[in-house]
Amino acid sequence: MKYAALIIPALFLALFCFAIFKKIRLYDCFTEGVKEAVPLVLSLFPYLAAILMLSELFERSGLSAAITQALAPAFSALGIPPEISKLVLLKPFSGSGSTALLSEIFSAYGADSYIARCAAVAYGSSETVFYISAVYFAGSKKNLAKPVVIALISNFLSVILGCLLCKVL
C-alpha cells in the first residue's frame, strides 16, 4: 500500500477532529463556502463557455488546419518539427484537444522518436492561455491584451527552446 495515498484522507480526518475539538459546525461552514462559490461560478461561466466554443469552432472550421499548414515551414525553420505544429497552435486554446493530439503523435511516430519528444516538451512547457486568462481575469476590468500576448510569446519561445534541447540531448 502506498502511504502517499493516505495523505489527503488523513488531512480530512485531522481537520474533522480539529473542528470537533473547537466545536465548529462543519456542515454549516461548508454550506457557507458553497454559497460564496456560486456567484464566482456564475461570473466565470460566460468566459469559459466562450473559450470552449471558440476553440471548437477554430478546429471544426478548418482554420486550424489552414494555419497549421501555412506556418509549418516557419516552424521548421525555427527548429520545431512540422508534425507538431498543430499541437503548438492548439495548446493555448484546448488542454483536452492537445492531449488527444499528443496521443495521436505518440501513436504515429512512437513515444521515443524525436517528434514525440518535441511534442511532449511542447505539451508540457505550454499552457492553455485563453482558458487560464478567462478564469483569472473574469472579474477584472483591466486590459487582457498585454498578459495574453506575453503568455503566448513565452509559450512559443519555450517550445522553440524545448525542441532545440531535444535535438541536442
Image (cartoon, rainbow, N blue to C red):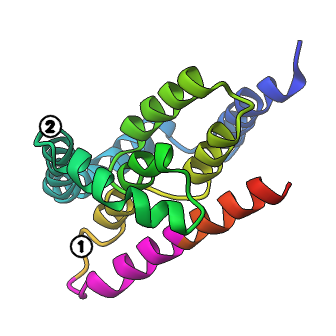
Give the residue type that dot 2 points to.
Answer: Arg
Q: Which range is magenta?
A: 141-156
- Of 52 and 115, nearer the camera is 115
Q: Quadrant of the C terminus?
A: bottom right
Residue 128 % position (x, y) = 41, 55
Q: Which residue is tagged 1?
A: 139
Task: Give the x, y percent position of residue 107.
Answer: 56, 20
Q: Quick check: 141 left or right of 5?
A: left
Residue shown at 21%/50% (left/top)?
66
Q: Residue at x 18, y 41 (%)?
A: 56
Identify which residue, 35 or 28, lies in the foreground: 35
Neighbor class of circle 1 (other Cα within 10 Å; few <14, some 14-19, many 20+) is few
First along the sequence among labels 1 and 2: 2
On the image, the x and y values in percent for residue 60 come to 14, 37
Image vertical order of residue 164 relative to residue 51, above or below: below
Amino acid bearing label 1: Gly
Q: Does residue 141 sit above or below 73 in this rendering? A: below
Which residue is disc 2 drawn over?
A: 60
Q: Secondary structure at mark 1?
A: loop
Q: Secondary structure at mark 2?
A: helix
Specify whether 24 is left or right of 7. Answer: left
Mark 1 vs mark 2: in front? 2
Q: Gap in Å between the C-alphas at discs 1 and 2?
A: 30 Å
On screen, residue 101 above or below 144: above
